[in-house]
Structures are given as structure tokens and as C-alpha cells.
Image: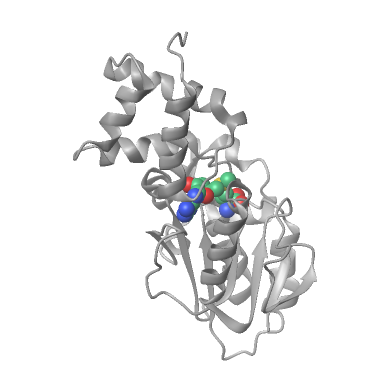
Amino acid sequence: MNSIQLTDAEFQKISGLVMELSGIYLSESKKALVSGRLAKRLREFGLDSYNAYFDLLMEPGGQRELQHALDLLTTNETYFFREPDHFDYLRENLISQLPSHDSFRVWSAACSSGEEAYTLAMVLADSLGSRVWEIIASDLSSRMLDKARTGIYPESRKKHFPPFFFERFCQPVVKNPNEFEIDRKLKRRVHFMPINLISSYPDIGPFDLIFLRNVMIYFDLETKRNVVRKILGMLKKGGHFIIGHSENLHGIDEGLMSIKPSIFRKI
Ligand SMILES: C[S@@+](CC[C@H](N)C(=O)[O-])C[C@H]1O[C@@H](n2cnc3c(N)ncnc32)[C@H](O)[C@@H]1O
């Protein structure tokens, strides 16, 4: 039971910090969520106020806890073959028209625990086989990236998988039959790295395709505009940019041609 009250001033401090570090905008309506999700940390540290927790985050050694707090306050929901029409589009319109000698590079930006990146890898491996292709997958959360790198998921994550892909690219974990593991050869073709979308990007481009799905919903318009401008700098001319179905690029789609809802091409 959370009996410690989160005051408006404390909420402002915490939401300001989250904004500064991740670009995620926490409106007043998220106050209960913030106090609920951080309450356990206050209890674990034996603190009697959110101010004291904020001070702990700001201490020189507070980096680790800061990452933990960000993890608690961000939404990491994801699953294999999420928004499947994007993968159909990739197979039917992009890969099928790829000249046979061309390589194909994809960036799954904000990949969470890796399901999006591995889904891309399965589709590419199925269609391109041993041809040259590569997937870079990144996220702000080191905890999510650690999970992603294991390539091990609970059985419940099988839910949205087309059986063909599951049978071809996943194996049960020998020591724990309630988990499955992504094929090791496939795993090696996905490179996970930490990238904060609101900071500077490492020199990893250019890409033929960038997935930026279900993260911009948490940004305000200014952050969204800046992130999209920087991301497009990493995309080849003629390359494709795919966002989540619940997101839009209203007013910030300069230099892009809309192909169908949530799918764009750089012109
Ligand atoms: C809801 S998940 C989306 C995962 C996947 N793209 C999908 O559509 O299923 C959002 C992810 O964005 C990440 N994220 C939030 N702010 C970020 C930032 N500034 N830079 C990089 N990743 C960020 C979170 O850590 C989280 O894993």
C-alpha cells in the first residue's frame, strides 16, 4: 500500500527529469502512474518522500537507479509480428524488388526487448537467406537491451507468431521448457546497442529501412520533430520509414512521401 503522497512539486521535478533524459512527456494525468510505479523503490530504499528519491537519483552514484527509474516510467510493451502488415509490406514490396546484388540494412530504433528486431530478422532470413543484410536494434533502456541480447522469451510470447516462423527460427530452451530461444545464427545477425533518440547518434547509417514504432506517442511535438529530422538523416534516399499505426507525422513529414498509413519513403 502506497501511503506516501507525491506532491505537485515533486511530480514536476521527476517529470522534468524524465523529459530531459528521454524526451518522454508525462502529463499531469500521469501523476498516479508515477507515484504508483516509484513507490516500491521508495520502500526499498527506506525513503519517506519522493523528494528524497529524487535526491538519490541526482547523487554522483545515482546513475544505475536513474536507469531503473526510467525503466519503471517508460512503456516497453512489444511483441513478435506486431502490426503484421508492416512485415507483409517489407516482404512483398521491398525485398521482392531488391536487385539481387544489393545489400539491405535495417534499424529497429526503440526496439525494447528485441521482438521487433528478431521479427525483422526472421522475415529477412526467410526472403534473403545468406545474402548481405544487417539489423541494428537500439533502445534507451539497458535492461531491455540485456533481455533482447539473450534472445530467450517465455512461452507466452509465442502468441502472435505465424507457426511457420516459430518452427523455423525458435527452439525450446533445454533447461526450461517454458521458454524458447531465437535461433543462434539468426541472433548473431542482429546487433543491439544503446541509443537515446534525443541525443547524438553513432555513425551507424545509412539504412534502407528504419522502424520507429510506438515510441513517438510518448514525445511532445518538438521532441518528435527533432527525432524524426535526425532519424531521416540516417535513411538512404528512397529508403523507407515505418511508424506505429497509432502515430502520425502531421506537420513533420517534410522530405517524405506517404505510401500508405504509417509507411513513408524518403524523397
Ligand atoms: C512501447 S516500446 C516499442 C517497442 C517496439 N518498437 C514496438 O513497436 O513494439 C517503446 C520503447 O521506446 C524506448 N524509448 C523511450 N524513449 C526513448 C528514447 N529517448 N530513446 C530510445 N528509446 C526510447 C523505451 O525504452 C521502450 O523500450
Q: Does residue 267 lie above or below 106 as drawn?
A: below
Which residue is at a point 39% across and 34% down the rendered structure image?
69
Front in this rendered view, residue 245 or 39: 39
Front in this rendered view, residue 125 or 71: 71
Q: Is residue 113 visible?
A: no
Q: How far across and down, in percent of the image, does residue 11 sit?
A: 47, 29
| Picture quarter with the C terminus | bottom right
Q: How far across and down, in percent of the image, does residue 47 sit?
A: 30, 16
User: Horizontal placement of 73 versus 262: left or right?
Assistant: left
Q: Quadrant of residue 173?
A: top left
Which residue is at a point 47% across and 61% down the rendered structure image?
137
Q: How far across and down, in percent of the image, does residue 153 sit?
A: 49, 41
Query: Which residue is the extreme one toward the right?
Result: 260
User: Horizontal placement of 85 versus 166: left or right?
Assistant: right
Which residue is at a point 52% across and 46% down the rendered structure image?
24
Q: Does residue 177 lie above or below 92 as drawn?
A: above
Query: Which residue is the extreme one toward the front?
Result: 9
Q: Does residue 172 lie above or below 267 as drawn?
A: above
Q: Does residue 241 lie above or below 198 as drawn?
A: below
